[in-house]
Image (cartoon, helix red, strand yellow):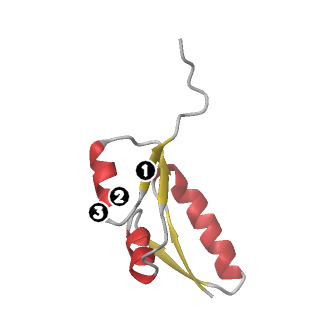
Amino acid sequence: MRLGIAGYHRGFELKEKIAAELKALGHEVVDFGAYELAQKIKDDFPRIRIAVVTGHDLPEYRRAASQQGVDRFFCKGFVGLERD
């Protein structure tokens, strides 16, 4: 089976580990950039909804995601940060 995978920053090492395991199982793994995979999915399946969960809540990230076909952009909190 041909599978697409994407990730960046802290998810890079996990993405590489998952890709290696999928290849060991006999799958073809195509590595995409963070938002390139969203565009590819939208091209092939225009009715599908895509959400991104990230720790980067900057306008340029939201804009890039939207331009590549991402429907929802969620910014997650960081584990371990204390609030007053």
- Residue 43 placed where, x, y %? 38, 80
Separation of marks 1 and 2 at Cα, in angstroms: 8 Å
Q: Determine which of the numbered discs, if any, sits on residue 73 in the image.
A: 1
Q: Amino acid at mark 1?
A: Phe
- Residue 14 placed where, x, y %? 60, 58
Q: Residues within 10 Å of mark 1 (few under 14, many from 20)?
A: some
Q: In what element is the residue under mark 2?
A: helix
Q: Determine which of the numbered discs, if any, sits on residue 65 in the image.
A: 2
Q: Residues within 10 Å of mark 2 (few under 14, many from 20)?
A: many
Q: Is residue 53 left or right of residue 64?
A: right
Q: In what element is the residue under mark 1?
A: strand
Residue 78 is drawn in which quadrant?
A: top right
* Residue in view at x 57 percent, y 63 percent: 15
Identify whether 38 is placed above or below 82: below
Of 34 and 69, the residue lying toward us:
69
Q: Circle 3 sits on which residue?
A: 67
Q: Is residue 54 left or right of residue 16?
A: left
- Residue 6 placed where, x, y %? 49, 66
